[in-house]
Amino acid sequence: MRTQQELRNQLRQIDHKGYKAYKVLEGEYDFGTYRLCIDHVQGDPFASPSRVRIVYFNRRIIPGEYLEKKHRRIAVEDTLLRRLHRALGECRDRERKGSGKSGLVTACRTGQEILERTAMHVAPDAIEARIEVGFPAFGRTIAADALADILFDLLPEVAERAFSGKQSPEMRQKQGTPRSSSGFGRSGQMPLAKELEAAVFLADNQEYIREQLVQQGLVAFVADGSVLPRESGVSQKPLRGAVVFNSPESLAVTMELPHGGTLRGMGIRKGITVVAGGGFHGKSTLLKALERGVYHHIAGDGREYVITDAGAFKLRAEEGRCIHETDISMFITNLPTRTDTARFSTENASGSTSQAANTVEALASGSTVLLIDEDTSATNFMIRDDRMARLVSDEKEPITPFIRKVRSLYQDLGISTVLVAGSSGDFLGVADTVLQMDCYVTKDVTARARELAAPLTEEKADRKVWIKKAVSRKNIEKARVHGWDSLSLDKTEIDLRYLEQIVDESQTAALAYILSYTLGKLADGKKTAAYLAEEVSRKLEKEGILSVTPRNYGAGAAAMVRKQEILACLARYRLL
Ligand code: ADP
Ligand code: MG
C-alpha cells in the first residue's frame, strides 16, 4: 500500500500530461481511517468514470450483531449507501470544470426498495464503498490539482460524514473552510448509530412478517395504515393524502413484531384470491404493491409493511416478445398451422402465446404465487365464456384458458394466484377469497361472490418446464444497459419493459453481467435456460454479484435479482 505523499508526488509528476498518464495512479493508498483503492482508471475523459473504492476501517462502528444475519447486513449496507449519497450531495457545492466527466463523483443510486448492492459491502472489519470518479482533464490534458481536490479534500470529508458516526474536532474546525461552510454541523444526517438501529429494526420486523407468511399459510400481508398508491406514474414516492389501507375484519391478522408492538393487517391466504371492484377503485394499485412486496421498502415509503412471498411473479401479456422452444402445450395446442406447441418458438408472440410462455417460465423458475391484472392480460388467455364455448367448440379452440387451470395450479402444484378481475364474473367460480376494492377501501365479499358463482370446467395443470437449451456465447463483448427496462448484449437488445418486478436500473445492470456470464461460462448447448437460471442464482446466492462481473475491479452499480428475472431475461434474448 502506498502513502498519501506518494500519491501527491505522482499527481504532481503527471500534471498537464496526456490523459493516459493517469493510469499510474491505479493502486492502493493509506488514508489513515480508510484505504483508497484506485481500481481502474478510465481511458479518456469521456469514457465511463474511473472506479474507486473506499475501504473504511470499521472499528466497532457497526455492531457485530448487525452483520450476522443477511437481512440485517443488507439494511446496514443500504443505510450506509444512502448516507454516502447525502454526504456527496452536501459536499458537492464546488464547481466542476473540464471536459467530459471531469470531476464527477457518484455512487450507485437508490430508490424505495432495499436491495443487496455491489456499491456497498460491510464486513466485521471494514466498510467498502464503490464510487465512480471522473478524473479531471482539460481536453485530454490531465488536471491534477482538480483530482487532488477530490482525493485529498472531498473524499475524506465524505467518508467521515457518512461512516465515522462522530463529529470529530478536526471536522468541526474545518467548518471555517469554504466547502464546509455549507455546514457540517447543520448537515441533514441523523446520527449514524440511530439511523443504523432504525434500519436494522425495520428489517427485523419485515423479516419476521416474511417468516410469519409461511407459518400462517399466507402469500402476502398488507398492514393497516399502509399507503399503496404512488405519487405519479413516474415517481415511486408515496401519494400524499391517500386513503390508507385498512384490512377487512374477516381477513385481519396480527403480527407481534420483534421491535415495536403489534401490527394488524390483511393476510392474503394461499389459494386463489380475486380482487374485484369498479374501475378506478384501487385494484391495480393493490396488486402493484404486492408485486413490489417481494422486496423490502425503506421507512416512510408507505409499503414498508406490505410483504409478499418472495416467489411471487407478475404475469402479463407481452405481444412481440420472442419465445424459444418452450412447452406451452398446457395452454395452447392444435394450432391451425399444426405447429408443435410442446416446442413452441416465435420471434413475434401474440398476446395469448406470450402470456402462456410467461406462465411456463414463471413455473420453471419456481414461482409460488402468480400475480395477474386483467388490464395487462390477453383476454383469450384468461377466459372463454360459456356462450363462446358453445359457439366455438373446445376442439376448434387452441387455447385452454388460464381460468380452467388455476385451481389445479394451486391444488396440485401449490401455486397460488392473486388476480385482479373487474369485468369477468367467471373468476368468482374459482376463487377462495374475493376482495372488493370500493373507493380504495378493501372489503371481503367472498360470501356474496359464492352465491353468484357459476360452476366451471376445470383441467389439470402440470409443471411442464421445458425451455430451450441455451447455446454458449463466449464472445459477448459489450453488455450495455439502457435505463432500467432494456439491455443489450453486443447488438442484440433485450426488452425488459414488461418485467415489472425489475424495479431498479442497477438490477438491469446486474442482469447484463449475469447474462454475459451465464451464456459465456455456464451455457454449453446442453443445459436448458431454466437449469442455467437456477445454476447462476445459486452462485449469486453463495458468492454475490461480483462473482459474475468481469475483470478485477467489479461493478459499482449492480443490485441483486431473483431467479425469476434471470430466467425471464434469458428467455427474451433473441439469440438464446
Ligand atoms: P383500478 O385498477 O381499480 O382501475 P387503480 O388502482 O389504477 O384503479 O387506481 C386508480 C387511481 O386511484 C390511481 O391514480 C391511483 O393512484 C389512485 N389510488 C389508488 N389507491 C388509492 C388510495 N388508497 N388513495 C388515493 N388514491 C388512490
Ligand atoms: Mg386497473
Image (cartoon, helix red, strand yellow):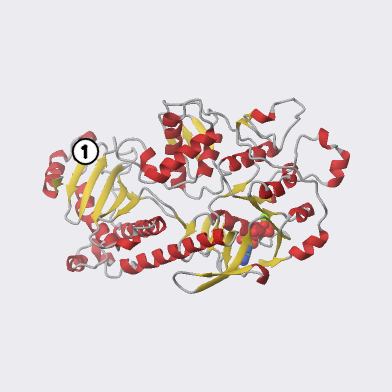
Is there any visible trace of residue 242 in the rendered image?
no
Q: For the point 79% across and 44% down, which residue is it?
A: 384
Check disc 1: other Cα within 10 Å, few if <14, some if 14-19, many if 20+. Answer: many
Pick whichever, 172 or 15, lies toward us: 172
Is 62 placed above or below 45 here?
below
- Please report the residue visible at 59 percent of the width from the left and 39 percent of the height from the top: 361
Q: Nearer the viewer, residue 148 or 80?
A: 80
> With respect to residue 400, does 440 lie above or below?
below
* Image point (11%, 48%), residue name: 5
Q: Nearer the viewer, residue 167 or 312?
A: 312
The image position of residue 259, as x and y in percent, is 44, 71
Q: Tag 1: residue type?
A: Tyr
Instruction: Specify whether residue 552 is in view.
Output: yes
Residue lying farthest to the bottom in this orientation: 261
Q: Quadrant of the N terminus?
A: top left
Image quadrant of residue 74? bottom left
**Residue 107 at x, y = what percent?**
35, 51
Q: Secondary structure at mark 1?
A: helix
State whether residue 263 is above or below residue 533.
below
Q: Which residue is mark 1?
A: 22
- Across and down, in percent, residue 427 comes to 75, 53
Residue 428 in picture, x, y percent from top left: 76, 56
Q: Residue at x 20, y 41 (%)?
A: 27
